[in-house]
Image (tube, grey):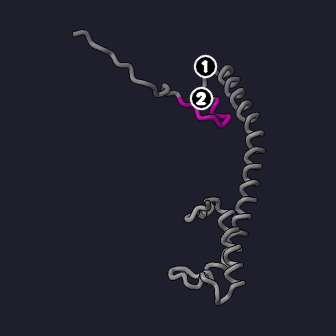
Amino acid sequence: MSNKNPRVAVPANIEELLNLANLIYQKHQADGGSSPLNSLQEYSWDTIGPGIQQALAKHNEAEALKRQSEKAFAERNALVADVADIVKSTRSLLKALNTKNPKKIGDWGFDVVESPRPGKEKVVETAK
């Protein structure tokens, strides 16, 4: 027994949605004046349809740029690990060499903050 009210899914994925829209638009164009989609009141496939290919091209361009961006971030992260380690080692060495005058470390570009690190306030309870 077949379902008399089947579900017809609309893809949530943008690429799948654009591909489906393209198929619908092609069928609408092939049917011409006899297309049942001409009866849509608020939308027109003749108006929106031509933009589908452009939207799909922009989607593909964005996906390619996303892949390039991910690759660039991965390459950057591989380099930054060593940079962060050498900067921390340099800071430690310069602190050890300048224990009496830590402000000299600022000559190397470091921010030297002499005030104590902000932390949790100590709560002193008074005896009652």
Residue 61 position, x and y percent, is: 73, 64
Residue located farthest toward the front when viewing the structure as drawn: 1
Percent across and percent down for residue 47 are 61, 83
Q: Which residue is mark 1?
A: 100
Quadrant position of the C terminus in the picture: top left
Q: Which residue occupies the foreground of this view, 120 or 110?
A: 120
Dot 1 alpha-carbon crowd within 10 angstroms: few under 14, some 14 to 19, many 20 or more: few
Label 2 Cα crowd, 10 Å radius (few <14 / some 14-19 / many 20+): some
Q: Nearer the viewer, residue 104 or 81?
A: 81
Q: Nearer the viewer, residue 46 or 66?
A: 46
Residue plotted at (65% across, 37% down): 109
- Local SS, label 1: loop
In the displayed structure, 118 sits above or below 60; it is: above
Residue at the limit of the structure toward the bottom, as seen here: 33
Residues under numbered marks 2 and 1 in contact, where contact means CB atoms less than 8 Å apart:
no
Q: Residue at x 64, y 90 (%)?
A: 33
Q: Say which residue appears at 52% left-offset and 27% top-offset.
A: 114
Secondary element under disc 2, as helix, strand or loop, is: helix
Vertical side of 76 occupied by 122: above or below: above
Q: Disc 2 marks which amino acid? A: Lys
Residue 103 occupies which quadrant of the picture?
top right
Q: CA gap, disc 2 to disc 1?
A: 9 Å
Farthest residue in the top direction? Answer: 127
| Residue 35 % position (x, y) | 64, 84
Q: Is residue 74 magenta?
A: no
Instruction: Name the disc covering residue 103, or none.
Output: 2
Across and down, in percent, residue 5 comes to 55, 64
Q: Residue type at mark 1?
A: Lys
Q: Quadrant of the N terminus?
A: bottom right
Residue at 71%, 78% (x, y): give it.
26
Range drawn in magenta: 105-113
Quick check: 25 above or below 102? below
